[in-house]
Image (spheres, rainbow, N blue to C red):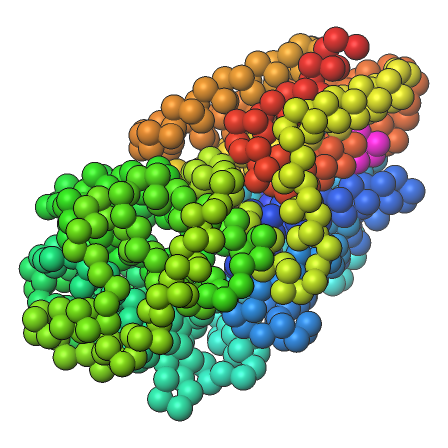
């Protein structure tokens, strides 16, 4: 066994690790409907079980590496099948949001096998390389650099190539490659199995549809599609087509009643409807808006592949209509850069703010952007889940934060209560009316013959006492407004939903948001000082410093990923690329750290970096395209460089103080992952939703201030 062969095998392990992590993260986030808290649980699960694998791995000889690599290959498709059928296994129907406790548990269970193997492989490789290089420091540093190069390669391969094809064929490729690699040096007679699996990749493409049907047990799957943004499934039952996007119901077609109400209400509240912009995935809303005979309807949608899927299966009448202009790309960015005429109406059909991605259509910043492209009598329409008869604290905070944010920009906000709350906002509300006869008459004047939007039907929705009750509740809200970098509406929505399941985490989050920021900072400082005070011995101090750097790295990554999603839009096809750039910085940093450096200078550099990051995030609020697309990868690179420098410096410090190389690699790698695990818990769950992005950087900087002082 030579160093080159082992390096090739571990390079493949690194590629497989990041690619599978990114792929499984995307699948799980889709199942959990995309909230940052779900993403935090997923990352935390990966990190803590990788740390466990690292801790376990030091108890075994390095030769276990090859068996573990085969195990990693075998586990890949099995975990994929488990994740794809997670809802069926735990009996949670499509469209239902998981309780927070269940999200945490399932994230940990789903990722445990491959994460444990990944951690064991790192320590086993360190043991083998130490024997080959005849030096603990050189061997461990070499493994760390090879792992980083593999991680970087895996991230870039996913972002540029594998995100565009189905998941199962990708996993077959890497399952076969890992078995071939492991049997190249050990178990040679079983190498043919790897070649058979590689040859079976075309079969994996054909298995995608049966696997998809297993995930929709109560539906007849008619067609499915895949793009860098979406997994799309069309089901048909009793003449009703239902389109699922990433596991959630996008719309049912045809469904005239719901579509008519959410389209007619805003269009009769403005005196003219010449130019309309609609953000929706549902072609029936476009068809309904065309009944008012506007000059132009701008249909804003994210994904060209999704449009082709809808046209192929549903054959909507709007395609080919000269009045409809389809605009493909991030809808928020299209509206911000609007170059068309001033609009009479903007209709939003984007669902509740489940994550930072959808939350950015409910923020003060977005409402200001819309106000600049509307005519004085133009209207903005949005909808959200509510209750017309009872407001819990969480529901009031959720609805109230959006209502007050809207009211801070628009002079008039008309409230239409229901299980779905309709809000219609305009700068000049003189044309607004909630009189059923008036609304029906305006339809007739526009040449529209409604089926459901009639006075008799509207009386039940527009009861004056119900409108007064809901409006008074919304007006009573005096809490935080919803901002891009302070997404309180998404946080309140999550708490509100968690109350349906009587979960404890939702109640904990609600209790935490009542703690003043100064008290939280004081408690955080006290905790950090206590931890540092208990780690005065040399080895403990080095381990703690690596843990703190891991905490900062994960926190910065979560902030950058969230900020990128808020500013740029859909994230997950860039997730691998951003991870790859982070690993590039880590590789260069590890090479630099292997030669010279000290942890104090790195800690000071990270602290300064956080101040710079705060300023850059402030500048990016202007949504300058160049700044976002170039700065965020560079920031990821810089943070990776700091982390890469620290690890070999800490290894050298421990080895020179008599710690065995394999043990040093294990405890430092475990500390790095445990610190990252704490960052994955605290940043998306507590700091960011409670105090916003900029205050989160203060909390993340406090440990380094304490380390530098003490």
Image quadrant containing the N terminus? top right
Along the line of sight, the residue nearer the viewer: 29 or 619: 619
Question: Of residues 680 and 204, which is closer to you in this image?
Answer: 680
Q: Quadrant of the C terminus?
A: top right
| Residue at the limit of the structure toward the front, as seen here | 465
Q: Quadrant of residue 679?
A: top right
For image coordinates 30% across by 55% down, the residue present is 414
Name the residue at 90% across, 44% down.
60
| Main secondary-structure element of the magenta-colored stretch | helix
Q: Could you tell me if residue 52 is visible in this image? A: yes
Q: Is residue 380 left or right of residue 41?
A: left
**Residue 493 in sight here:** no
Residue stretch in magenta:
666-670
Q: Is residue 500 above or below residue 135?
A: below
- Residue 275, position as x, y percentages in the image: 12, 55
Closer to the camera in the image, 286 or 27: 286
Q: Is residue 67 magenta?
A: no
Residue 131 found in image quarter: top right
Is 129 left or right of 363, judged from the image as shown? right
Name of the residue lying farthest toward the bottom: 238
């Amino acid at each position: 066994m030579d160093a080159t062969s082992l390096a090739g095998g571990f390079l493949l392990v690194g590629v497989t690790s990041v690619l599978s992590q990114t792929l499984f993260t995307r699948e799980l986030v889709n199942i959990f409907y995309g909230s940052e808290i779900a993403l935090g649980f997923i990352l935390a699960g990966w990190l803590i079980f990788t740390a466990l694998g690292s801790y376990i791995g030091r108890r075994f000889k390095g030769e276990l590496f090859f068996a573990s690599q085969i195990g990693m290959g075998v586990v890949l498709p099995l975990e994929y099948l488990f994740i794809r059928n997670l809802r069926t296994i735990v009996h949670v129907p499509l469209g239902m949001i998981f309780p927070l406790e269940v999200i945490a548990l399932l994230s940990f269970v789903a990722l445990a096998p491959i994460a444990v193997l990944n951690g064991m492989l790192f320590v086993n490789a360190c043991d083998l390389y130490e024997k080959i290089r005849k030096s603990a420091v050189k061997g461990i540093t070499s493994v760390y650099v090879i792992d980083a190069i593999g991680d970087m390669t895996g991230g870039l391969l996913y972002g540029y190539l594998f995100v565009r094809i189905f998941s199962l064929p990708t996993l077959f490729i890497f399952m076969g490659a890992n078995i071939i690699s492991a049997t190249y040096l050990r178990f040679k007679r079983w190498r043919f199995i790897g070649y058979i699996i590689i040859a079976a990749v075309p079969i994996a493409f054909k298995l995608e549809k049966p696997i998809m049907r297993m995930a929709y047990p109560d539906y007849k799957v008619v067609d499915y599609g895949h793009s860098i943004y979406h997994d799309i499934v069309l089901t048909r039952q009793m003449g009703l087509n239902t389109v699922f996007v990433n596991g959630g119901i996008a719309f049912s077609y045809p469904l005239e009643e719901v579509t008519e109400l959410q389209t007619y209400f805003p269009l009769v509240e403005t005196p003219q409807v010449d130019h309309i912009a609609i953000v929706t995935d549902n072609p029936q809303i476009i068809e309904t808006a065309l009944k008012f005979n506007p000059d132009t309807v701008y249909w804003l949608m994210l994904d060209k592949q999704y449009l082709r899927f809808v046209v192929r299966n549903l054959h909507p009448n709007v395609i080919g209509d000269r009045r409809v202009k389809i605009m493909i790309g991030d809808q928020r960015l299209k509206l911000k850069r609007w170059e068309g005429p001033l609009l009479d109406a903007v209709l939003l059909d984007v669902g509740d703010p489940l994550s930072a991605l959808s939350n950015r259509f409910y923020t003060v910043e977005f409402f200001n952007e819309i106000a600049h492209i509307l005519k004085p009598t133009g209207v903005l329409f949005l909808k959200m889940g509510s209750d017309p008869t009872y407001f819990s604290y969480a529901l009031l905070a959720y609805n109230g934060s959006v209502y007050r944010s809207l009211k801070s920009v628009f002079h008039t906000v008309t409230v239409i209560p229901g299980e779905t709350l309709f809000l219609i906002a305009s700068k000049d509300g003189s044309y607004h009316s909630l009189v059923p006869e008036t609304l029906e008459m305006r339809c007739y004047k526009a040449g529209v013959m409604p089926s459901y939007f009639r006075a008799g039907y509207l009386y039940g929705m527009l009861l004056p006492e119900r409108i007064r009750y809901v409006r008074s509740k919304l007006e009573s809200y005096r809490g935080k407004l919803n901002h891009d970098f302070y997404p309180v509406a998404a946080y309140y929505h999550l708490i509100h939903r968690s109350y349906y399941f009587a979960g404890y985490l939702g109640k904990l989050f609600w209790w935490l948001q009542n703690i003043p920021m100064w008290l939280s900072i004081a408690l955080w400082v006290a905790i950090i000082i206590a931890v540092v005070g208990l780690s005065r011995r040399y080895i403990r101090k080095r381990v703690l410093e690596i843990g703190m750097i891991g905490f900062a790295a994960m926190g910065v990554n979560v902030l950058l990923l969230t900020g990128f999603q808020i500013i740029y839009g859909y994230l997950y096809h860039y997730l691998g690329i951003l991870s790859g750039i982070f690993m590039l910085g880590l590789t260069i940093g590890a090479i630099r750290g292997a030669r010279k450096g000290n942890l104090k200078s790195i800690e000071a550099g990270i602290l300064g970096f956080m101040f710079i990051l705060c300023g850059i995030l402030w500048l990016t609020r202007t949504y300058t395209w160049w700044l976002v697309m170039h700065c965020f990868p560079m920031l990821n690179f810089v943070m990776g460089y700091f982390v890469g420098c620290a690890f070999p410096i800490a290894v050298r410090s421990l080895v020179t103080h008599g710690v065995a190389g394999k043990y040093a690699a294990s405890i430092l790698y475990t500390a790095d992952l445990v610190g990252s695990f704490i960052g994955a818990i605290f940043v998306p769950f507590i700091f960011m939703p409670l105090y916003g992005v900029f205050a989160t950087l203060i909390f993340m900087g406090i440990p380094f201030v304490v380390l530098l002082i003490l």
